[in-house]
Amino acid sequence: MSRPDITLIERGATRPMPFSLIPFVLLVIPLAEIAAFVVIGGQIGVFATLAMIVVTAIIGSILLRVQGFSLITRIQAETDAGRIPGRELVHGVMILIAGVLLLTPGFITDTLGFLLFVPALRDLGWTLVRNRITVVSAGGFSGRQAWRGEGRRTIDLGEDEYRDEDTHEGHDRR
């Protein structure tokens, strides 16, 4: 049985980010990164600075892979237990953002990316957004049902114990 799609829906009246703030952020972050490059490059040298950027990108991609696979396992465990994995989905978004930040060259974005890999900080983020979103499944899933059909018995038969017969026509379909 296939699992239904799960969607996060924001609930409540929230204010969208003003458009005047977006260009400001898009201007301030690169300027801050350039300033950090100049200051750190002046202290440790250009090649050491570039090496640090490459090393943080490599470490970030490794962390993204490890924590991403771990998160997928937790999401599957939650859905197998019949629970909607809201917390895990939000953690997944934060891990994705962390990966993008770590692959973006810069010390400030790397710092923010590494902070998002800390589970305690992701839990803090989950606490902040938990009451603002609702997790809805497209397949009519309720939290009390298991994905695999609660109450159904599974009988494991060997190949010699099973025979598929068409009872309406009276002959074996094999």
Image: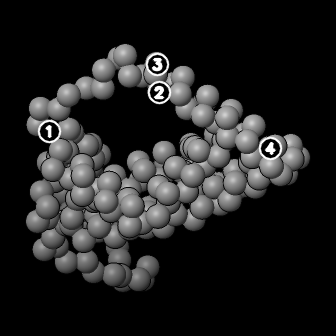
Q: Closest to the observer: 73 or 89?
A: 89
Kind of residue indicated by mark 2: Val
Residue type (three-letter) at the residue carrying disc 3: Pro
Residue 11: mark in rendering? 1
Query: In terms of secondary structure, where does tag 2 sit?
Result: helix
Quadrant assignment, res 80: bottom left
Mark 4 closeness class: few <14, some 14–19, many ≥20 residues within 10 Å:
some
| Picture quadrant of residue 160 | bottom left
Numbered badge on residue 121: none
Select label 2 or label 1 by which is in front. Answer: 2
User: Identity of the amino acid at label 1?
Assistant: Arg
Q: Are marks 2 and 4 in contact (CB under 8 Å)?
A: no
Q: CA distance from mark 3 to mark 1?
A: 27 Å
Question: Left or right: 10 with respect to 43?
Answer: left
Q: Which residue is mark 3?
A: 23
Callout 4: helix, strand or loop? helix
Which of the two marks, 3 or 1, is nearer to us in this view? 3
